[in-house]
Image (spheres, rainbow, N blue to C red):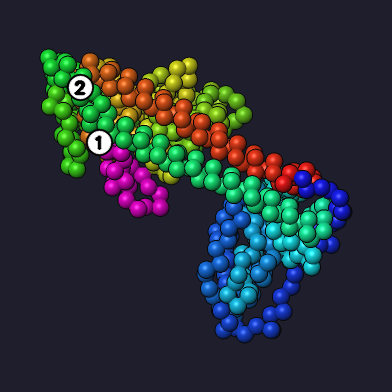
Amino acid sequence: MVKKTTWSQKPLSEVVDVNPRLDKPAYRDDLEVSFVPMAAVEAGTGRMDVSRIKSFGSVKKGYTPFKEGDVVFAKITPCMENGKMAVVPKLTNGIGLGSTEFHVLRPHAEIDARYVYYFVSNQGFRREAAHQMTGAVGQKRVPQSFLEEASIPVPILEEQQRIVAEIEKRFSCLDEAVASLKRTKANLKRYKSAVLKAAVEGKLTEDWRKQHPDVEPASKLLERILAERRARWSGKGKYKEPLGPDIAGLPAIPQTWSWSTVESVCSEIIDCPHSTPKWQPEGRVCLRTTEFRPGRLDLSDVRYVSQETYEERILRLKPRENDVVYSREGGILGVACMIPPALSPCLGQRMMLLRSHSLTVPNLLMHWLNSPNLLARVRSLAGGSASPHLNVGDVKAFPVPVVPAVEQKVIVAELERRLSIIDELEATVEANLTRTERLRQATLYSAFSGNLGG
């Protein structure tokens, strides 16, 4: 047990120099030095990339100087809250310059830099720092005075080093656990993609088809769907037959299946209103693409609009249970999910609503849109644009495998059985990842309260 025997509480400014000055004339302008932008410091890990090199003359003005063994502390939101702090490692020619959004803490003699790093990076200290931030929203910063006045427990150097060694021993075990959990998470993601791929290619129901050779082929179902579509257009103007599907690059499907398009298998397709709604604290739910997850809506942080705005946004079509909503713009591109029971939302921006034909199971359309087979098509259409998007016509023309009516239900039942197991395992992994972070913070709390066993 590390005992709190010879500890004293001191202002941080008594054990470190906060933002020490650099004697710039002592360095040649052509001297190579390490250059560290904010992105080079990893959040929450203490790792710092110092491989970027610049001449001292090109960075001596307008950047923050530091030396090996200093502790850098991100002062701006959200970098500070995310834990962008690090002990400065070996630098080119012993000096580095970096983001102006760093505070620099230079430990005095008899103060271990790692001890200071672990103290200022623990969540309790960061929460207090966040409360003391000043400035405008989005540009808030931790003032230098907060760091100077913050109280730090200071044992003798030998005890500091013993505490650091115990912290790092425990963190090493936690790091191994986290690495294993992340490998499991990646494997589950790959397995989920494989299951989706197998479902939409007919491999999940291969044995079922052998046992049911007389099932009516999907071509008959598709004929009925298209006949109903033509009938709906009767008397409404010139009917335009949907284009045939472009199945280039797609895998073969069972002989009893048929290829069609999103436009053909949907009774309704609408784009979202092209306006930003006015949000309010309560009212009617308005969907955002940030709530889209493959196969589900995350409704933990919904936004609301007034009844008047809601009525305006459902003029073309009122979303209902089992409609598929699809993101067609922005960072969350090509994600399909379904409107669950008891939710009556309106559409936000950058999305479409797809209502499956009554002769098709909407879950199957949703899973096809989320499958790796179609996501490859989405990436190809979106290209490498900084603001990727899909045109409404692109989505309507997406190829879709049409499955015999009876087999649709068999596929969805088997697919969702497997996906529910994967979801449960993923939830367990996430819970354990959260637990490792709690254990990490509990270790730091114990360390600086003098109760760290070792």
Q: Is residue 391 visible?
A: no
Is 87 rendered above or below residue 364? below
Q: Amino acid at mark 2?
A: Asp
Q: Is residue 284 positioned above or below 406 on the image?
A: below
Looking at the rendered structure, the number of numbered marks drawn on it comes to 2
Location of mark 1 (residue): 398
The stretch of residues the image draws in magenta is: 372-390
Label 2, secondary structure: give it: helix
At 60% from the left edge and 36% from the top edge, which residue is drawn? Answer: 435
x then y, percent, for residue 303: 55, 31
Figure quadrant of the N terminus: top right
Q: Specify the label residue 207 is tagged with.
A: 2
Residue drawn at x 65%, y 61% as measured from the top left: 87
Which of the 4 image quarters holds residue 210? top left
Q: Residue at x 27, y 38 (%)?
A: 373
Residue 442 at x, y percent in the picture: 69, 41
Disc 2 crowd rating (10 Å Cα; few below 14, some 14-19, many 20+) is few
Image vertical order of residue 372 relative to residue 305, above or below: below
Q: Is residue 217 left or right of residue 40?
A: left
Residue 165 found in image quarter: bottom right
Q: Amino acid at mark 1?
A: Phe
Q: Nearer the viewer, mark 1 or mark 2?
A: 2
Label 1 SS: loop
262 within the magenta span: no
User: Few, some or many C-alpha atoms within 10 Å of disc 1 (few <14, some 14-19, many ≥20)?
Assistant: many
- Is 124 or 74 nearer to us in this picture? 124
* Residue 110 % position (x, y): 79, 65
Nearer-the-camera pick, 114 or 123: 114
Q: CA distance from mark 1 to mark 2?
A: 28 Å
